[in-house]
Amino acid sequence: MARLLPEEVIVRVREDLDGFPNQCNVMASESASINSEAVKLLGYTGPYKISEQRFSREPISAVTRQGDPRWSDFVEWIIQGLIFAEEEDITQSQSFRFDSTTIFGGNDTHPHPTLEKMFEHANEVRGNYGEVYNVNVESFLQRSGMNLLNKGDSPIIYSFPLGDTSIEGPQIEVASPTVKAIKARGYLSCGVSLRKGFAEFDDITHKWNGFDVELCRAIAAALFDGVDHVRYTDMPAVQRFQELEDGLVDVLARLTTHTLARDVKEPTIGQGLSFSSPYFHGKFCHGALISHLDHD
C-alpha cells in the first residue's frame, strides 16, 4: 500500500491494534492516486471499486514561487488559453485560429523575442483542454461533474475572458527573472508526480506523457516559439515545495491541491506560493478491494 498512496495520506498503526485486520482491503486517497489503472500497475488484478461518495473537493493547480508575478501570470494564462480553446472549439489542427497577442511582449522592433503566438503554440502541442483530457485521463477517470466544461450550468471548468490581447505589455524576459533564467538554460524545468494518466515515463521510448506533462509542454512551447523544450522531475510530495522554492524546478504540475495555508504560508518553506486556477477537480474517496469485502 505504501507504494500506491502518497506518503502524506498514509496513517501507520501498530500491528496489534484491536479491530484492524492483517490485510488492508480499503484505502482512502485522492481519486487520481487510487484509480483502477493505478492499482493494476501495482499488480492487483482482482475486483476493485471506487466509491461514489466524495469526502472532499481537491482543486488541482499548477504552482510557482511567489515574487515573480509575471511568470505566475504566464503559467495561469497558458492554462486558461487551453480551456478557452475548448470553449471556442479550437482544436489542435486549428490552432492557427488564435489571434496574436503582445500582452507578454512587444513587437518585432523590440530586442527580445515576442510571444505573439503563445496561445497558438501552446495549443499546437497536444490540443485544447478537452483533447488533452481525452487522450490521457478519460479511459479511467471519465470526465464528469466539476471537470466538465461550464456552458452556463453547474460545472467549474471555464476560462476567464482574454480581453484585448493586442495591448502591448512589458517584455516578460525583462520583467520576469524566471523566464530570463529559463531562456538562458534553454528549457523549462517541470516538477511532476508519477501517476497513471498524469505523468508517466516510458522506459522503452524514454518519453514522458500524461495530463500534467502536456500542460508543461504547452507552457514550454509558448515560451520557445512552438518547440516544447522541457525536462521533467518526479518529485516526492514532502520535497516538492522546497525544491520549487530552491529553484530546482520552475513550476509544479503534480496533482497539488490549492489550499489557503499553502497560498499564504506553506508550512515546510515558511512562505506562500502562487497557484494557477484549478485545471482538474479531484475528490478524496475510498477504494475497495472487493474480494475482501463482507457481502453479508
Image (cartoon, rainbow, N blue to C red):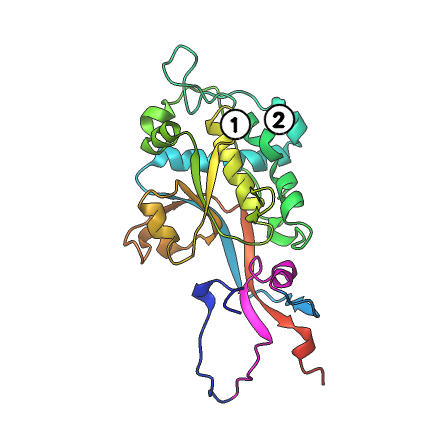
Q: Is 23 one of the magenta-colored residues?
A: yes
Q: Is residue 18 left or right of residue 244?
A: right
Q: Which mark, residue 227?
A: 1
> In x, y percent, where is residue 121?
55, 27
Please identify, in this view, whether the residue under mark 1 or under mark 2 is nearer the observer: 1
> In x, y percent, where is residue 242?
33, 51
Q: Is residue 6 left or right of residue 243?
A: right
The numbered mark, 1 or 2, whose residue comes first in the sequence reads 2
Q: Residue at x 55, y 52 (%)?
A: 281
Q: Tell which of 66 and 48 is nearer to you.
A: 48
Q: Is residue 212 left or right of residue 105?
A: right
Q: Residue at x 63, y 35 (%)?
A: 87
Direction front: furthest residue: 204
Residue 14 can be seen in this image: yes
Where disc 2 sits, the SS reads helix
Q: Tell which of 141 and 195 is nearer to you.
A: 195
Q: Residue at x 44, y 24 (%)?
A: 103
3D distance between C-alphas at marks 1 and 2 = 15 Å
- Quarter of the image where one finds residue 181: top left
Q: Amino acid at mark 1?
A: Val
Q: Which residue is mark 2?
A: 95
Q: What span is in magenta? A: 19-42
Indicate whether 217 appears above or below 37. above
Classify mark 2: residues with Cα within 10 Å, few (<14), some (14-19) or many (20+): many
Q: Is 24 one of the magenta-colored residues?
A: yes
Q: Amino acid at mark 2?
A: Ser
Residue 160 can be seen in this image: no
Direction top: furthest residue: 109
